[in-house]
Amino acid sequence: MNPISKTAFFCCGIRADDARSPSSIYSDIYAEDFMTGEGRTVYAPFSGNTRRNASNVVRARIIFDEIARRLKANKDLQVINIGTGFDSRAYRLAGGRWFEFDEAAVIEHKNTILAPERCPNTLRRRAVDFSAGELPAALRECDPNTETLIVIEGVFMYLDKAQVHQLLTTLADGFPDHTLICDLMTAVFFNRHMGKLYEQIVALGSEFKFVEDQPEKTFFDLGYRQPCPPVSIVGRARELKAFRIPGPALSTVLRTLRDGYRVHTFERLG
């Protein structure tokens, strides 16, 4: 698998550990099923650090809760997951017409472990070679004329700015009106708080590229607006008691920790 696929095992291993915890935050009952021998080898350097891994699980929980909220309003919502990894939300949420796009190795493994036919909701998966520009054709399998929620989790930091522009332009071309949920990291957060975790990610063969002072500005420049404030992953982790940080500290000396890595909801109206 390429380096991006290895990070899928890293994220899945964290969710599997969380699911075994009596105080699970995300309760992903399918995560362990995806963890092959190769996956456990990839995850081994990351295991055991509950506090450091908490942000990954909390990020998934924030996105899960937002999708659930939107599905309550529209059971027929089209949910498009790009770079889906080993996400299993389509099996755990009620409603929605789901599409999952990722590279062939990920999709083949997902289909083997958790077939689309087992999903209680409509689910279609498609293998995509992103580097070969196959995403636009794959997205044409979706309905451009229905309410659409696009989920891109744990992806943007691995793209350079030109690739971010290209991806957002592709989304706008395919879906003039859509909502996008994604996570974005600031350069200050990256420089001050990533530390050893990033060294381990680099050891997998990956690197972060899109970490800017105001990463959301790229989205605004391309026609997106933000209907609600972004959600602090660290702040939500504190609320969920994933770790303890005094509230006043997060509002002052640790503000870059609170505001540097957040889940954003963007809207684009054609």
Image: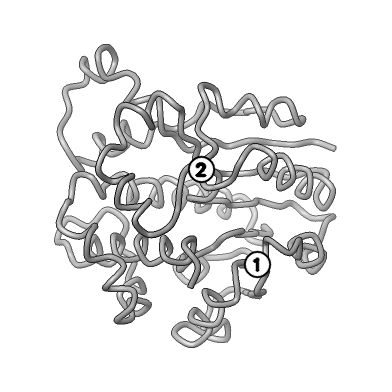
Q: Is residue 39 above or below residue 78?
A: below
Type of residue at label 1?
Phe
Q: In this view, does 168 lie above or below 3?
A: above
Question: Residue 65 placed where, x, y %?
Answer: 44, 49
Question: Residue 173 placed where, x, y %?
Answer: 84, 48
Question: Residue 105 placed where, x, y %?
Answer: 54, 77
Give neighbour class at mark 2: few <14, some 14-19, many 20+ (Cα, 10 Å).
many
SS at badge 2: helix
Give neighbour class at mark 1: few <14, some 14-19, many 20+ (Cα, 10 Å).
many
Q: In this view, does 166 lie above or below 193?
A: below
Viewer-closest of 236 and 49: 49
Labelled pair 2, 1 in contact (Cβ < 8 Å):
no
Could you say which quadrant of the image residue 259 lies in? top left
C-alpha separation, residue under disc 2 versus residue under disc 1: 22 Å
Residue under numbered circle 1? 99
Type of residue at label 2?
Met
At a point 34% along the width and 56% down the height, the residue shown is 203
Q: Which of marks 2 and 1 is in front?
A: 2
In the rendered structure, the answer to whether residue 187 lies left or right of residue 214 reads left
Q: In which quarter of the image is the C terminus?
A: top right
At a point 67% along the width and 69% down the height, the residue shown is 128
Viewer-closest of 31 and 158: 158
Viewer-closest of 222 and 77: 222
Question: Residue 256 placed where, x, y %?
Answer: 35, 21
Q: In this view, does 190 lie above or below 97?
A: above
| Mark closest to the chain's N terminus, 2 or 1 | 1
Residue under numbered circle 2? 157
Q: Which scheme is used to colour this image of the protein?
A: one colour
At a point 74% along the width and 51% down the height, the residue shown is 147
